[in-house]
Amino acid sequence: MILKIAKLPGDGIGPEVVAQAVKAVDAICKKFGHEVKYTYAPVGACAIDQCGNAYPESTHQVCLESDAVLFGAVGDPRYDNDPTSKVRPEQGLLAMRKQLGLFANIRPVETFPSLVGNSPLRRDLVDGADFLCIRELTGGMYFGEKGRLDGGDTAYDTNIYHRYEIERIVRLAYDYAMRRRKHLTVVDKANVLESSRLWRQIAREIEPEYPEVTTDYMFVDNAAMQLIRCPKFFDVMVTENTFGDILTDEASCITGSMGLLASASIGEHTGVFEPIHGSYPQAAGKNIANPLATILSAAMMFEYAFGLMEEGRCIRKAVTASIDACFVTEDLAAGGTPARSTSEVGDWVADYIANN
Ligand code: IPM
Ligand code: MN
């Protein structure tokens, strides 16, 4: 197969971790006889520096013409500390999600048996936890009308959802639940928010179409607690954009490191595969960031974008082997094991793929 991949490393540690995922992708393609063509395109702060736009039209074209987008991270402290800035790196990511119609963000939360000791949560709580968080990605407060009033002293963001947006993400979540343990948790704040009441109303309408799936409805504040009180309760969770952003950072604690959580964003056009951890500017250029979330995102790319399940499985196996061998970066190294660099871990994983 010929695989056309748009390579968007972005900012901070993005280029370092994407470079390691590329090593894994190359190793897989060599092993399975695929031809891969990468096209680089700028996004985020580096795109602003080049042309004043965090998601230039030329980058959008590259994405549209590719079969998948391998994405690193966006963000830069130059903008975080300047709330008056008109352009922001994060706008690049949001514009990309919107323009590619990527309404579903799938974030698997799985524990690695040899890492359960790394979680701040008790071993018996996290051991065996395995669920999917499905976050709506192109609606809600992120994209609703926002602005300032009263000469700037009043600010608002609108949390708006349309029926079609809720229907398509809830159906997608049910489809995933059907392929798993058939348990869906719909997370909302229907006791307070009108938009959440519409979510719950529509989910209840769709529920009878999936009689085999057990559905429960949970308020987001309670869900935040249940996630750490009893993570094994969850199989598939579906929620709106902002709640999903917050809950998935929280969920990364279950696995022991933010550096392990991968994601797939899918919808109308080319899918985007990215780690959830962000640009981590303090570590940029130091060759210390954990590349495994990006490598696992590449595994999701093979499965979701190309339908190449065996290739995806092979990448996962290599990642698990590196963890079992304690060949890991400083966020995971414990108890006297030396911390390896980003590129050393990338090389190890690529070698494992080539030789196993
Ligand atoms: C994420 C990130 C983004 C988001 C930021 C960088 C805009 O935190 O992918 O979770 O809030 O969606
Ligand atoms: Mn986030």
Image: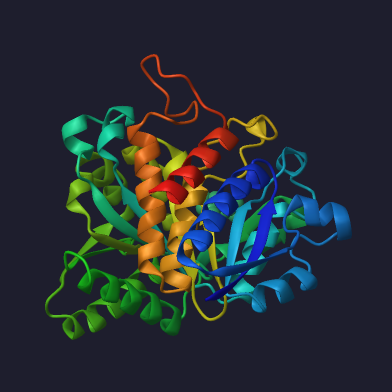
Describe residue 240's horizontal placement relative to residue 281 as left or right. Answer: left
Looking at the picture, the colour scheme in use is rainbow
What residue appears at the point 48 percent right and 58 percent down from the top-left corner? 28
Looking at this rendering, what residue extends furthest in the top direction? 336
In-front residue for pair 147/87: 87
Describe residue 354's horizontal placement relative to residue 109 as left or right. Answer: right
Q: Measured along the vertical axis of the image, is residue 308 above or below residue 256?
A: below
What residue appears at the point 72 percent right and 43 percent down from the top-left corner? 76
Q: Position of residue 32 (x, y in %)?
A: 46, 65
Q: Position of residue 159 (x, y in %)?
A: 51, 66
How many labels sit on residues? 0
In-front residue for pair 149/181: 181
Q: Measured along the vertical axis of the image, is residue 66 above or below residue 51?
A: below
Res. 223 visible in picture: yes
Q: Position of residue 272 (x, y in %)?
A: 55, 65
Q: Position of residue 138 (x, y in %)?
A: 53, 70
Describe residue 281's horizontal placement relative to residue 200 as left or right. Answer: right
Describe residue 167's horizontal placement relative to residue 58 as left or right. Answer: left
What residue appears at the point 54 percent right and 40 percent down from the top-left corner? 347
What residue appears at the point 81 percent right and 62 percent down from the top-left corner? 53
Res. 136 visible in picture: no
In-front residue for pair 196/255: 255
In-front residue for pair 228/1: 1
